[in-house]
Structures are given as C-alpha cells and as structure tokens.
C-alpha cells in the first residue's frame, strides 16, 4: 500500500502516463485506418492494449490492497489518474470500432 504522499503521486502518474500512451496509440490507430493502413492500425491497437494492461495492473494492485482492508487517502490526482485511464480505455474501444468501419468502406 502506498505509504507516503510521494508514493501515491507516483502511482497516479504511472496511471496517467500509461493511460496517455494508450490514448495516443488508439488515436494513431484511427489515423492509420483512415489512410487504409490497417496493419499499422492493428499494431497501434496492440500498443494501446499493452499500455492499458500496465496501468490496469497498478489499478488492480490498489483495488486488491483496499479490498484486503488496507486504506489510503484518495486525492484529486488519483481521481484524475483513474479518469484518464478510463477515458483511454473508452477511446481504445471506439478506435477499434472505427477501424472496423474504415475496413468496410
């Protein structure tokens, strides 16, 4: 469990960084599909998935620790980090749908 404010900030920043990487990769996937570069689009979706997986592990560790009775202070940065990650996950899913649509055109 995070023992200090600095550790919690590091966790939050890790979520933000990986979430940002995932969103960027998803955006690149859409741009590639728009140019009929579907192999690149699929590669970028895999990159987004890898970034989300890294962030999800951090998130799951926090949830597991909290579920086992360990508590920690929730701060605005952590809320922002969670929001950032969830937006990235949504963007990734929408990117996959957009790639499928571009393939059909």
Image: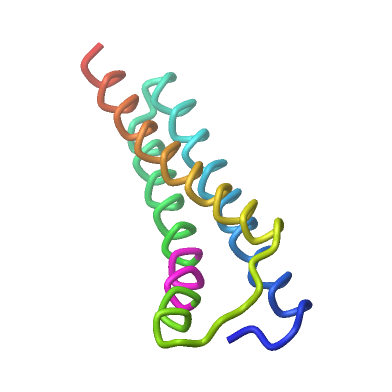
Q: Quadrant of residue 34?
A: top left
Note whether 1 is above or below 55 in the view shown.
Answer: below
Query: Taking 69 as reference, is 19 left or right?
Result: right
Q: Quadrant of the N terminus?
A: bottom right
Query: Taking 87 as reference, is 3 left or right?
Result: right
Query: Residue drawn at (39%, 26%), measured in percent from left and top?
Result: 33
Farthest left residue in view: 104
- The question of residue 59 being in magenta is answered with yes
Q: Position of residue 3 (x, y in %)?
A: 69, 88
Note whether 76 is above or below 54 in the view shown.
Answer: above
Q: How many marks?
A: 0
Query: Residue drawn at (55%, 55%), measured in percent from left and top?
Result: 82
Colour logic: rainbow
Per the picture, the main secondary structure of the magenta-coloured stretch is helix
Farthest right residue in view: 6
Query: Residue drawn at (51%, 49%), measured in percent from left and top?
Result: 22
The magenta-colored residue range is 55-61
Q: Nearer the viewer, residue 47 or 2?
A: 2
Query: Taking 59 as reference, is 37 left or right?
Result: left
- The question of residue 84 being in magenta is answered with no
Q: Position of residue 32 (x, y in %)?
A: 45, 28
Query: Residue drawn at (51%, 72%), measured in percent from left and top?
Result: 58
Q: Position of residue 84 (x, y in %)?
A: 58, 48
Q: Quadrant of the C terminus?
A: top left
Q: Quadrant of residue 57?
A: bottom left
Q: Position of residue 97 (x, y in %)?
A: 29, 29
């Amino acid at each position: 469990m995070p023992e200090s404010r600095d550790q919690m900030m590091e966790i939050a920043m890790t979520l933000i960084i990986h979430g940002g990487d995932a969103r960027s990769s998803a955006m690149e996937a859409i741009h590639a599909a728009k140019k009929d570069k579907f192999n690149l689009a699929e590669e970028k979706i895999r990159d987004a998935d890898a970034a989300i997986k890294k962030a999800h592990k951090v998130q799951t560790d926090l949830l597991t620790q909290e579920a086992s009775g360990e508590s920690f202070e929730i701060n605005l940065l952590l809320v922002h980090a969670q929001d950032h990650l969830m937006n990235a996950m949504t963007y990734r899913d929408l990117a996959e749908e957009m790639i499928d649509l571009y393939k059909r055109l």
